[in-house]
Amino acid sequence: AVMAPGAGAPTGSVRFVNAATNAVLATVTLAGNSAATTLPQASDPIVAVYSGDANFQTSSSDALTQLAATNSASYAKLSLAADEIVTLFGSNLGVATSYAAAPSDTLGGTTVKIADSIGVTRAAQIFYVSPAQASILMPAGVAPGPATLTVASSGQLPVSMTIAIGPVAPGLFTANSTGQGVAAAQVIRVHADGTQDAPQNVAVFDTRQNLWVPAPIDLGGPTDTVYLLLYGTGIRHYAAMPTCTIAGKPVALAFAGAQGSFPGLDQVNLLLPSSLRGSGTVNLVVTVDGTAANTVTLAIP
């Protein structure tokens, strides 16, 4: 929208420009004091540049980041699932940064709604919202297929996008919160007498390198049973028990499902065989109903 200063009605045109490449996406003649064009398929930020006229100076808008919805653990965009924690990126998602003690249908003046493939619209609960990012819980019962996600924030026009809903959309959390690198996971060793050691994290922060690195996993003695506890989202509604490989070798699952104490958080418990001893830094892949989660790493000396 073209704003004052200026006298009379503004004329001229607006160029919509890809802020990453400087490519002109569209040139639109003003209608009144505004110009509009269909959002492009590309996800790069967009800037509107007003040509100006005899009474109004040229001007440019702030960059608009198009709305994107991702798995909060892996940041994958291919599909989402019911009861999954989802991270939204965009512009004007909230008027200020707000956190919820418990997820809420409205937070900081922002609402998120999902209209699914059978025409049912549900509110998504919101954990966190800021102008550029939000964290939500995909509603339970949302139907598989194409759906429309709409974000409405106080004082802003609602913005929508098409998303794909599947039965599952697995993602695993990592220590550095990027969906890559060392798993955000714990190891528990159970001894033959039934006692167990305190959980140990499989990642440690290296202050010299300023990054998370694998903590060596101790597989214990010959009579110990060692469990690896992974945390993720988009997993719980599987049709068949998920599978896992570590260093390309199948590993047995003891449990996969809702973690129970945090909305949307899923847990996968693996039984680590002694045959993995000496594997070094390895890749771990969990596959749910044919869909692989993001690859994470471990260290097994």
Image: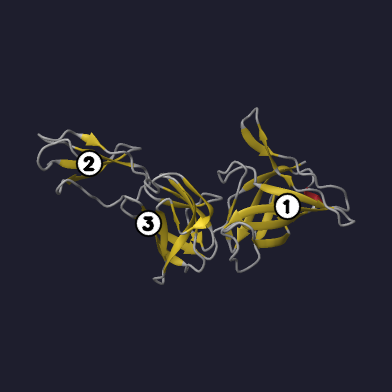
Along the polypeptide, which appears first: circle 3 or circle 1?
Answer: 3
Kindly identify the residue that appears in the image at 65 percent across and 30 percent down: 207
216 vs 34, left or right, is: right
Q: Position of residue 191 (x, y in %)?
A: 86, 53
Picture quadrant of residue 177 = top right
Mark 2, residue position = 15
- Vertical arrangement, residue 215 with respect to residue 66, above or below: above
**Which residue lies at the image location 70% right of the left edge and 51% below the top edge?**
246
The quadrant of the image that shows the C terminus is: top right
Q: Is residue 121 left or right of residue 18?
A: right
Res 216 quadrant in image: top right
Instruction: For mark 1, give the secondary structure.
Output: strand
Q: Amino acid at mark 2?
A: Arg
- Say above or below: 178 vs 82: above
Residue 84 position within the rendered picture, expressed as x and y whole percent measured from the top left: 54, 59
What x and y, as percent, mark residue 294?
58, 50
Amino acid carrying label 3: it is: Met
Q: Nearer the viewer, residue 195 or 284?
A: 195
Please give left or right for residue 129 compared with residue 197 in the image. Answer: left
The residue positioned 42% from the left and 62% from the top of the image is 114
Residue lying farthest to the top in this orientation: 208
Residue receiving disc 1: 228
What x and y, as percent, mark residue 117? 41, 69
The one nearer the camera, 261 or 236, is 261
Tags 3 and 2 in contact by the CB under 8 Å rule? no
Q: Residues within 10 Å of mark 1 (few under 14, many from 20)?
A: many
Badge 2 local density, few (<14 within 10 Å), some, or many (20+)? many
Q: CA distance from mark 2 to mark 1?
A: 54 Å
Disc 3: which residue: 161
Q: Are marks 2 and 1 in contact (CB under 8 Å)?
A: no
Give the vertical position of 165 relative to 202 (above or below). below
- Judging depth in this view, the residue of 149 and 216 nearest the camera is 149
